Amino acid sequence: MAATVDYFFSLVSPYAYLGHAAFLEVARRHGVAVRYRPVHMLEVFAAAGGVPLGQRPASRQRYRLLELQRWRAARDLPLNLHPRFFPVDASLADRAAIALLHADRDPADYMLSVFRALWVEDADIADPQVLATCLAMQGHDAAKVLASAGADGVHAEYQANTEAAMRADLPGVPGYVRDGEAFWGQDRIAQLDDALRSGRAAFLPT
C-alpha cells in the first residue's frame, strides 16, 4: 500500500505556492499518495500563537520579504512581493479544491492556477469570476464546482482539515504530515524527501 502524505495548505499562502510543484514532484518520485487538505490559515496561525501579517513586528514583515525573494530565486518562480489583492479571503478558493476532490478530480492544476492568479497575475482570488476562469482553464465545470463549494459538507470538511492541522501541531501552512510527523513550510520539503527515501520511522514529540 502506498504511503500517504497529508498536504495542508491555503491558496492565499505564498509559501504554499512556492512549494507546490516541488512537493508534488517529491510525492510522484516516491509513489506517495497525496491527501489534499485546505485549511482556514488564520485559524491555524491563531491556534499556534501566530498573528496575521499586518499585526507582526515591522522587522518580521521585512524579513518575510527577504525570504520570499530568496525562495523565489531558489525555486525559479515568478512572484509579486506586493500583490494588488492581498491580504484576501481565500475560503471560497480553498473550498473549491475540496469540491473538486468530492467530484474525484485532481485539484493540483487548479491550485497552481489560483496561486498564479494571486501571486503573479494580480487577480482577486476572492472573486468567483476569477476562480471560474481558473477552473475552466483546467477543464472543470466552474459553475458546478463553485456551487458545490458552498455545500454544508464542504464547509464541514474545511473545518475538519483545519482542526486536523492544529492537532498535528502545524504553526502554519504549507504543512506536510507523514505518519504523524509534521513538516512545516516549503523549506522542509527536502527533509520530507529524505524521510521518504530512507523509509525511517516517523519522528514524533516525546
Image (tube, rainbow, N blue to C red):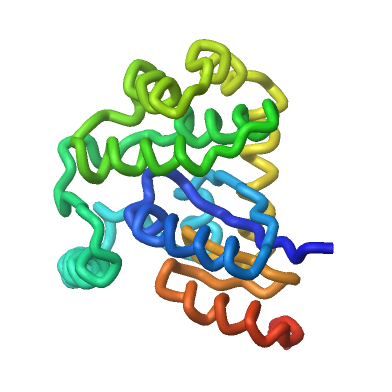
Q: Does residue 54 appear to the left or right of 50 in the view shown?
A: left
Q: Does residue 36 appear to the left or right of 202 in the view shown?
A: left
State which quarter of the image contains the N terminus: bottom right
Q: Residue at x 67, y 51 (%)?
A: 35
Q: Does residue 54 appear to the left or right of 44 in the view shown?
A: left
Along the line of sight, the residue nearer the viewer: 43 or 161: 161
Q: Residue at x 60, y 30 (%)?
A: 100
Q: Residue at x 59, y 61 (%)?
A: 28
The number of callouts visible is 0
State which quarter of the image contains the C terminus: bottom right
Residue 170 x %, y %: 56, 65
Residue 66 x %, y %: 17, 71
Q: Does residue 114 appear to the left or right of 62 in the view shown?
A: right
Along the line of sight, the residue nearer the viewer: 107 or 152: 107
Name above or below for residue 132 compared with residue 102: above
Q: Residue at x 45, y 68 (%)?
A: 185
Residue 108 x %, y %: 51, 43
Residue 97 x %, y %: 55, 34
Name above or below for residue 161 compared with residue 49: above
Along the line of sight, the residue nearer the viewer: 190 or 125: 190
